[in-house]
Amino acid sequence: MADYNRDEMRRQEKRLSEAKKSQQIVDSMRDDTEWPQSVKIGEKESKTIDIDISDNLFLKVAKAAHERDITINSMINNIIKDKLHDLDYKFEHNPKPQFLAENK
C-alpha cells in the first residue's frame, strides 16, 4: 500500500531544503563587496581595463588630448566610444552595394 502522506512530507522537505540553498546563495551575494549597495540614477558605470599601445600612438593620443584640453583617459574613452558608434553604423549600413530586383 502506498504511503501518500510520507511522499508529501518528503516533497515538502525537498522544497524546504532547496529554498534554504537558494536563500544562502542570495545571502552570500549580499555579503559580497562587489554587490551594489546603492544605485544612483544617471550615474554611468565604469570599469578599469589595461591597454597596451606603442609609444608613438600614446604620444599622438596625448597631443590630441592636450589640444582638446582634456585628460588622456578622457581622450581614450572618447576614442573608444566613437569607434563603437562607428561599428554600430557600419553594422546597420552595409558599405557593399546591393542589387535590388523588382519582380512583377
Image (spheres, rainbow, N blue to C red):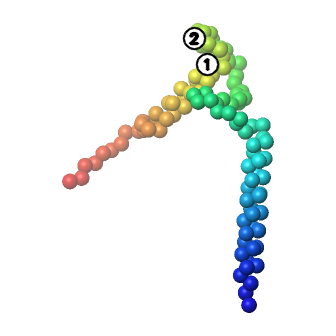
Farthest left residue in view: 104
Give x and y (percent) for residue 55. 71, 18
Q: How far is mark 1 from mark 2, CA to CA?
A: 9 Å
Give x and y (percent) for residue 76. 63, 22
**Quarter of the image with the N terminus in it:** bottom right
From the viewer's perspective, is 94 left or right of 22? left
- Circle 1 packing at 10 Å, graded few (<14), some (14-19), many (20+), is some
Q: Would you name the residue on which mark 2 appears?
A: 68
Give x and y (percent) for residue 11. 72, 72
Mark 1 or mark 2: name the one nearer the start of the chain.
2
Name the residue rendered at 62%, 13% in the picture: 70
Mark 1 touching mark 2, by CB under 8 A? yes
Q: Which of 71 and 35 is in front in this view?
A: 35
Amino acid type, label 1: Met
Farthest bottom residue in view: 1
Name the residue rendered at 72%, 75% in the picture: 8
**Label drawn at residue 30:** none
**Quarter of the image with the C terminus in it:** bottom left
- Looking at the image, residue 102 lies above or below residue 14: above
Name the residue rendered at 60%, 9% in the picture: 69
Residue 57 position by quadrant: top right
Q: Would you name the residue on which mark 1 appears?
A: 75
Amino acid type, label 2: Arg
